[in-house]
Image: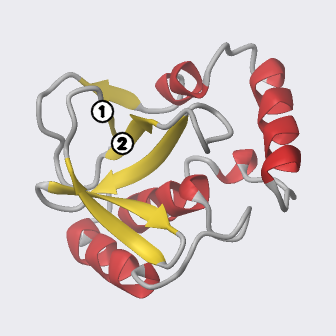
Amino acid sequence: MVHDWDIRLANYVDSVRYRGFDWSEFDCLVFANGAAQAQLDQGVFDDWIGDYNCYKSAYKHYKKLLKRHNEKSIITAIDGRLNRVDRLMPMRGNIVARGHSDLSVVGVTLGVAVSDLIAFVGNNGLIFCKIEANDIFWSVS
């Protein structure tokens, strides 16, 4: 972690606060990767972001990604890169996965803990939500 990670994370979240969802330009993976980059000075999912522009091409991209890494789900793939946090509440800066089977390519949407709230990418900008019982957290440190 860089010494001023918390300020850099806050600045990053503020800079994208009103940026709406856009495939591979600003989807949940791009957002989570940017949050990790703010904290570490490097992205943790850089090689996962692809050249997709719709649900169908994103779905194909991530299926190939999981197969290439011999993973069954995005959760186990993230487990291979980050340390899962076994807590009831995430720490600020943790990457968060929330089940979202209807619209998600991989069955979850990724967000970032910013306080007692989780920031997720919405159509018109970030959405700040309370923690839910089945959320999964990872530390980027």
SS of the residue at dot 1? Answer: loop
Q: Is residue 87 left or right of residue 59?
A: left
Compared to 2, does 4 lie above or below? below
- Circles 2 and 1: CB atoms closer than 8 Å: yes
| Residue drawn at x 58%, y 38% as measured from the top left | 102
Foreground: 4 or 90?
90
Badge 1 crowding class, 10 Å Cα cut-off, few under 14, some 14 to 19, many 20 or more, is some
Q: Position of residue 66 (x, y in %)?
A: 75, 24
Q: Residue at x 82, y 57 (%)?
A: 54
Could you classify mark 2 by the number of other residues whose Cα lies within 10 Å: few (under 14), some (14-19), or many (20 or more)?
A: many
Q: Which residue is mark 1?
A: 135
Q: Quadrant of residue 84?
A: top left
Residue type highlighted by circle 2: Val
Viewer-nearest residue: 141 or 139: 139
Q: Identify the image quadrant of the N terminus.
A: bottom left
Cα separation, mark 2 vs mark 1, equals 7 Å
Report the side of 101 relative to 38 (left or right).
right
Q: Could you say which disc has been placed on residue 77 in the image?
A: none
> Measured from the top left, where is residue 97 in percent x and y?
41, 38
Which residue type does callout 1 highlight? Asp
- At which x and y percent is residue 113? 26, 54
Q: Earlier in the sequence, mark 2 or mark 1?
A: 2
Name the residue beneath numbered marker 2. Answer: 96
Residue 26 position, x and y percent, is 62, 69
Q: Nearer the viewer, mark 2 or mark 1?
A: 1
| Residue at the far front in the pictured view | 102
Which residue sits at x=35%, y=67%? 127
